[in-house]
Image (cartoon, helix red, strand yellow):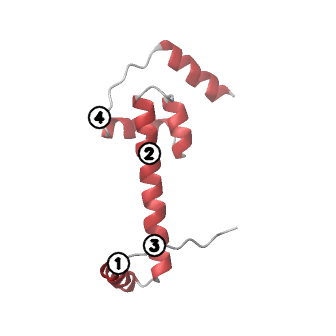
Amino acid sequence: MAKTVTTRLDDGYVKKIDEMAARKGIDRSALLRSFFLCALKEYTIRDSLEDYKAGITTLWEAAQRCNLSLWEMIQEVKRAHIHTSYDLREFEKDLRALNA
């Protein structure tokens, strides 16, 4: 079930949001929902990349958390210029997760 979430914004931000919503032909709530979902996805990817770089999660686990395919997650790693050693132990762990 959907829940209502509220927040306070300065008048200047509300004015910009309303102007953008009007240009797009949608209401303020729809625009803010779009902003929030986009930011949530971006934050989840960034957070997962940090965990992957720190060795906390495997590439496959990071991809699952982000709801991305393994190949899409590899592209995110490349975009973030993350260079980590992907050893045999991690590969085997990812294989087990794929087969589960």
Crowding at mark 1 (Cα within 10 Å: few <14, some 14-19, many 20+) = few
Sequence-earlier tag: 4 or 1 = 1
Looking at the image, the residue that sits furthest to the top is 88
* Distance of label 2 from label 3 (alpha carbons): 20 Å
Residue type at mark 4: give it.
His
Q: From what the image shows, is residue 48 above or below residue 5?
A: above
Mark nearest the camera among 4 and 1 is 1
Question: Which residue is under mark 4?
Answer: 81
Residue type at mark 3: give it.
Leu
Sequence-earlier tag: 4 or 3 = 3
Sequence-earlier tag: 4 or 2 = 2
Residue type at mark 1: give it.
Asp
Point 44% across, 43% down: residue: 47
Give 96 or 62, whichever is nearer the viewer: 62
Query: What element does badge 3 sit on?
Result: helix
Query: What element does badge 4 sit on?
Result: loop
Residue type at mark 2: give it.
Ile
Question: Which residue is under mark 1?
Answer: 10
Q: From what the image shows, is residue 66 above or below residue 88?
A: below
